[in-house]
Each structure stands twice: as C-alpha cells, then as structure tokens.
C-alpha cells in the first residue's frame, strides 16, 4: 500500500477515535483511542470468522506499517523534543539525583532483574528463550513512558516534584534504554562481542556522543533563533533541529533520543528566555503541543491495531501475564532504593514511591523495540501484554492512587 494511503488511514482513524472518545468515553485521549482501536481489531477478527476476508485486508494494512521504524526513526524524536521543550532546568536540577539514578542505574538493574527472573519462569513453562534474549526483554520493557499519564498527573494535582521526576526520568531513560537494548540485542544475536570493554565502549559512544551532539545542535539552533525575529522561520528551525538532528545522530551511530532531549532542553530553557520573543514562544508552544497530540493519537491507534499482526499463543500470553507483577516489582525496587537512600539528605513528597511505581507506564517504545526483533514472537507478545496492562489498568487508576494519598495526608 502506498505511503500516502497509509498516512491517510491512520490520520482518519485517529480523528474518528479521538472524537468518539471525547464525545462519549471521556477517557484520557491516549488510553481512549487505544481501547477503541483494540475493540475495532477484535471486531475485525470476529468479522473474519463470518467470512469476507476482513481480517486479512486489515492485517495487510497493519503489516505494511513498519512500527519499529515508524516510531524509533520517526515519531520518537518529535515526541521527545515536545516533552523536553516544557521541562524547566531549574526543576530538573532539583531532582537531578533521583532522575539520574533511576534513568541510568535503575534501567540497567531493571534489565537484569526482569531478564533473570523471566529466564527461570520461561524455563519452567517450557518456552525456549536464551538468557541473553531474556535480558533483551528486560531492556525493552524497562523504560517508562509518561505520555498517557502526564495529563492524569496534572488533572489529579499531583505534586510538581513527582511530575518532574516522572517526566525527567522518562525523557532520559528512553535514550538509555535504547542504548542498553542495542548492546544486549547485539550480544544476543552475535553481532556484538560480549566483552566488558566492548560493551562499555559502545554504551559510552552512544550515550555520551548523543549528549554532545545534542548540545552542539541545540546551541547552533539557539544562535540562529537569537539572530532573527520571525516566528515562522523559528518554528521551522526547531522542526529541522529535530528531524535533521535525529537523522545525523543515527548516521554517526550515537543516541538520537538523548541528542534530541538535550537539544529540546536547551531550546525550551535558554532559547525561550534569551532567543525568542513572547509571540514566537506562543507559536512554538502551540505548534509542538499540536504535533505532540497528533502523534500520540496515531501512536496509540497503532498500538491497538498491532493485535492484528501478532502471533498470539496461550503460553506466550500467560508468560506476559506473569511478567506483569515481575515488571512492577522491578519498578518498585529501582525506585525505592534511591528514594530511601536520598531521604537522608532531602525530603520527598508523600507516597512518591507508590506514585512513581504505579505511574511508571510502559508504552510505544517497548512495543517498537520488541517488533524490531526478528523471529522472537514470545518477546513481542509478552511485551504487548505488559504494555496493555500498564496503559489501561495503571493509566486509569493512577489518578485514584494520587487522590487517595493526598486525602490521607490532608
């Protein structure tokens, strides 16, 4: 199917599902459109049982969309930049230790904890998955995705410090997790040697290189923005910064997500204060908020439609259900340890461990990384099950948790 037709179908579905959700369901947009998308997918599966080849036609459309390339080399750069653009460095600096630990050490510990436990679980279940590929599953399911929960946090009047922790952590752990995934997946497939220095070198080049590139590109864009006063051109510069910067990072084999986040923080802070007028800031915010909303709607429609493309097996679904509490326990451990340690030196909001644990949703990046693997249906299905539970169950109940904690403290 032609690219234009695919884009037309996705935009149309996103618009219709968003309308239905806003008009009747009143759920958070991302959760609502995904649920409607899943229901439609199940309806197509049922319709196929009645004849007409409806499922096959829908599957052909879904299979023609390279989800992994669409998200990792397309949407992700725009979503991360849009998120970083509104994060204040002052708030980020206040939470730097907890964000830094959970986004780096936390991701690595989570990878090994989930991978190790799932290795023994799958062994007992008779699912043949090597230890390295179990670590691959741990790496791709460890990054949190706040897209679906940030609106809920604001609506529930969550403490600003908690919102900053979850947002800041997710912006950086996406980039770190992609690097960890690439390293572990490379070792699992035999493309990367499992030597300590080789792994450290690859991780350093990807992560540090991405940060340096993001700083250079962000400063270059800042200089251009400061030298002109035309909001149309300035918005275009930020668009080029994201798309061109991400492509350049991929060509240089450094972390594109980290580069885009660093560039977004520079433009959203130094650029906003010193290089742009109030009119430009208003247009820039409106533009990127719209991009963010549109891409989020399309992304979660795609997640819902992926049910048509997956090879579901009862044993894989069962393994995914077992993985849910393991992933949550891993999240609890990697949040609780740094919070308990840092409590000696600073205070935290009430219930911060519970909110960060339950509010650490898994999302599209996990699905995209899973789909980038070849011939690993077990990992893909387990990932999909965990992500669905995370977005639907955790996403719809985290507000109640926040309200309950606030009422208890009142």
Image (cartoon, rainbow, N blue to C red):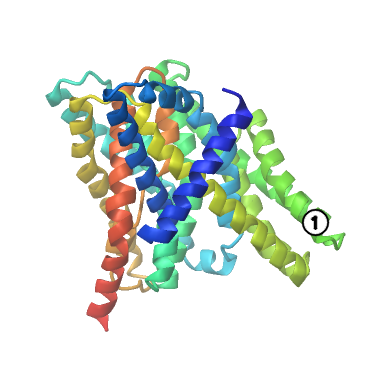
Left or right: 233 in relation to 3: right
Which residue lies at the image location 70% right of the left edge and 67% below the top edge?
Answer: 282
Position of residue 391 relative to residue 41, above or below, is below
Position of residue 331 relative to residue 134, above or below, is below
Which residue lies at the image location 23% right of the left edge and 27% below the top edge?
Answer: 316
Across and down, in percent, residue 369 comes to 44, 32
Q: Does residue 7 appear anywhere in the picture?
A: yes
**Callout 1 environment at 10 Å: few (<14), some (14 to 19), or many (20+)?**
few
Left or right: 118 in relation to 157: left
Position of residue 355 relative to residue 146, above or below, is below
Which residue lies at the image location 56% right of the left edge and 52% below the top edge?
Answer: 292
- State the quadrant of the N terminus: top right
Across and down, in percent, residue 262 comes to 62, 51
Q: Does residue 146 appear anywhere in the picture?
A: no
How many marks overall?
Answer: 1
* Residue indicated by mark 1: 232
């Amino acid at each position: 199917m032609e690219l234009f037709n695919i884009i037309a179908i996705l935009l149309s579905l996103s618009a219709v599902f968003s309308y239905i959700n806003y008009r009747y369901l009143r759920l958070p947009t991302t959760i609502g459109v995904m649920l409607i998308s899943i229901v439609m997918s199940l309806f197509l599966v049922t319709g196929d049982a009645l004849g007409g080849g409806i499922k096959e036609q829908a599957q052909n459309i879904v299979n023609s969309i390279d989800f992994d390339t669409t998200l990792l080399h397309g949407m992700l750069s725009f979503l991360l930049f849009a998120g970083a653009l509104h994060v204040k460095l002052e708030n980020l600096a206040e939470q730097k230790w907890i964000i830094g630990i959970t986004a780096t050490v936390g991701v690595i510990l989570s990878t090994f904890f989930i991978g190790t436990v799932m290795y023994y679980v799958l062994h007992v279940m008779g699912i043949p998955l090597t230890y390295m590929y179990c670590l691959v599953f741990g790496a791709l399911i460890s990054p949190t995705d706040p897209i679906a929960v940030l609106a809920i946090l604001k609506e529930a009047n969550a403490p600003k410090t908690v919102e900053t922790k979850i947002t800041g952590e997710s912006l950086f752990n996406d980039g770190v997790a992609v690097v960890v995934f690439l390293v572990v997946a490379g070792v699992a497939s035999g493309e990367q040697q499992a030597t300590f220095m080789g792994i450290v070198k690859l991780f350093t080049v990807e992560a540090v290189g991405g940060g340096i590139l993001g700083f250079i590109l962000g400063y270059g864009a800042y200089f251009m923005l400061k030298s002109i006063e035309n909001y149309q051109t300035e918005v275009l510069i930020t668009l080029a910064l994201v798309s061109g910067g991400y492509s350049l990072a991929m060509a240089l084999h450094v972390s594109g997500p980290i580069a885009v986040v660093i560039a977004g923080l520079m433009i959203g802070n130094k650029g906003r204060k010193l290089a742009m007028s109030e009119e430009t800031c208003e247009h820039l915010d409106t533009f990127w908020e719209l991009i963010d909303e549109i891409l989020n709607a399309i992304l979660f429609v795609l997640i819902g439609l992926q049910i048509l493309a997956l090879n579901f097996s009862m044993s894989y679904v069962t393994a995914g259900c077992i993985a849910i509490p393991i992933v949550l326990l891993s999240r609890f451990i990697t949040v609780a340890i740094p919070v308990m340690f840092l409590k000696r030196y600073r205070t935290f909001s009430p219930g911060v461990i519970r909110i960060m644990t339950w509010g650490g949703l898994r999302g599209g990046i996990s699905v995209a990384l899973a789909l980038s693997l070849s011939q690993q249906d077990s990992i893909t299905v387990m990932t999909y099950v965990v992500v669905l539970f995370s977005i639907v169950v955790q996403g719809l109940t985290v507000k109640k948790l926040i309200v309950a904690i606030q009422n208890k403290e009142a």
